[in-house]
């Protein structure tokens, strides 16, 4: 049976936000690391960039961690099992629950994991983390890797039972060994964090590579950071860019920003400013404040794209609402003719109002 994507809680122990670390002019607040920037046509004082995402010995948890998702298993030849997943896909959760219950009672591990999913996410049944954990446990004991990972995340978050990081690590390691990429990714973060497990950067890199090779965008982005910085692996800008490209194709917004900056400056890949600007536009529309700020700079200064100050200052104002303000752009905005400034402000309000 092909399992559904299972959204888990408390998964990211480390965040690696896209860094403005190359040449696109960044916001000037209080950066912690300098960065290269694209030079606008008119001479301007260079600014420092936002800090690059560097693995550290004490990475901090994100205030709004991204959810991890269990990768679906290969489809089963059993038509009854496919009926369960088919009902789930159609949103017929009560039907899926009834069918899965019958299959689970007959000993089917995939159906057990489905029940864990339904209970955990209140789909067709009242949310009950304790029952979700029970079904995940039964499926995990039967060797289901998705259930192992799901149960590990419940143990880490303390849902459905007390927090048990030791059990969570064991389950995660077993799931990773069986090829579950989300388990490998989260286990890599635990080795990087150095709190639940002894810090082991090389082991973290190995696990990230396993998850990245399985096509997990978050792992591809994180591993790209490792190769870019030479952390746990030899420094390799070209390989970093290839990983960023792969993650970008899967719509990982942080990777899109990093890959756009690499293409803009020709770092680890041939320079392609039009393609970089297009990718910055995409990431900006997806809500990346860093992309919005970089896009504002290239549009206002006409670097790699025709000058469009109204659109550029629109993105500057949008980025500013997310904390990516820029005093230099504020100054340029104040010097803009009143009509153009009003148009940029109206465009920003329209964008923010439509979100």
Image (cartoon, grey):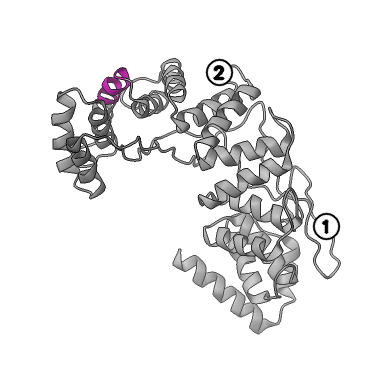
Q: Residue at x 67, y 30 (%)?
A: 56
Residues shaded magenta:
133-142
Quarter of the picture containing the C terminus is: bottom left
Query: Can you give x and y, in whole percent of width and height, for residue 348 in the image?
Result: 56, 70
Earlier sequence position, callout 1 versus callout 2: 1
Q: Residue at x 70, y 75 (%)?
A: 306
Query: Can you give x and y, in whole percent of width and height, for residue 38 in the image?
Result: 78, 60
Residue indicated by mark 2? 197
Quarter holding residue 313? bottom right
Residue 16 can be seen in this image: yes
In front: label 1 or label 2: 2
Asked if labels 2 and 1 touch by Cβ distance under 8 angstroms, the answer is: no
Q: Is 49 rendered above or below residue 77?
A: below
Q: Is 267 rendered above or below residue 353?
A: above
Please give the label number shown on residue 66. Answer: none
Residue 312 included in the magenta stretch of the image:
no
Magenta segment's dominant SS is helix
Instruction: Assess disc 2: are there few (<14), some (14-19) or many (≥20) residues with their C-alpha within 10 Å of its C-alpha.
Output: some
Front in this rendered view, residue 321 or 170: 170
Front in this rendered view, residue 220 or 326: 220
Q: Residue furthest front?
A: 77
Q: How many marks?
A: 2
Q: Residue at x 79, y 52 (%)?
A: 36
Query: Can you give x and y, in whole percent of width and height, for residue 159 in the image?
Result: 34, 27
Instruction: Assess disc 1: are there few (<14), some (14-19) or many (≥20) residues with their C-alpha within 10 Å of its C-alpha.
Output: some
Q: Is 283 rendered above or below residue 310?
A: above
Provide the secondary structure element on which disc 1 rests.
loop
Residue indicated by mark 1? 46
Residue 62 can be seen in this image: no
- Left or right: residue 171 versus residue 51 is left
């Amino acid at each position: 049976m092909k399992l559904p994507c299972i959204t888990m809680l408390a998964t990211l122990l480390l965040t690696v936000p896209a860094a403005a670390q190359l040449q696109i002019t960044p916001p000037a607040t209080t950066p912690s690391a300098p960065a290269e920037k694209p030079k606008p046509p008119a001479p301007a004082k260079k600014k420092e960039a936002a800090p690059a995402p560097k693995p550290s010995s004490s990475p901090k948890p994100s205030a709004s961690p991204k959810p991890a998702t269990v990768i679906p298993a290969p489809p089963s030849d059993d038509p009854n099992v496919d009926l369960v997943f088919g009902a789930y896909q159609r949103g017929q959760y009560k039907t899926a629950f009834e069918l899965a219950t019958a299959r689970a009672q007959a000993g089917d591990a995939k159906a057990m994991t489905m029940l864990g999913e339904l209970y955990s996410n209140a789909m067709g049944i009242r949310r009950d983390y304790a029952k979700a954990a029970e079904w995940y446990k039964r499926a995990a004991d039967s060797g289901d890797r998705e259930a192992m990972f799901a149960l590990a995340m419940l143990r880490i978050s303390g849902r459905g039972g007390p927090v048990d990081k030791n059990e969570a690590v064991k389950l995660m390691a077993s799931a990773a060994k069986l090829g579950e990429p989300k388990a490998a990714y989260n286990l890599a973060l635990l080795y990087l964090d150095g709190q639940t497990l002894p810090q082991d950067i090389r082991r973290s890199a190995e696990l990230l590579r396993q998850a990245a090779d399985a096509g997990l965008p978050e792992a591809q982005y994180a591993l790209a950071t490792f190769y870019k910085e030479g952390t746990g692996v030899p420094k390799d800008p070209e390989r970093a860019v290839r990983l960023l490209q792969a993650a970008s194709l899967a719509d990982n917004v942080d990777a899109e920003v990093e890959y756009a900056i690499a293409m803009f400056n020709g770092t680890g890949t041939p320079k392609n400013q039009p393609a970089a600007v297009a990718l910055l536009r995409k990431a900006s529309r997806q809500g990346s404040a860093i992309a919005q700020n970089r896009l504002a700079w290239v549009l206002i200064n006409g670097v790699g794209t025709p000058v469009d100050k109204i659109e550029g200052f629109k993105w500057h104002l949008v980025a500013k609402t997310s904390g990516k303000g820029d005093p230099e752009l504020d100054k340029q905005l104040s010097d803009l003719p009143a009509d153009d400034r009003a148009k940029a402000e109206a465009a920003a309000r329209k964008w923010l109002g439509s979100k």
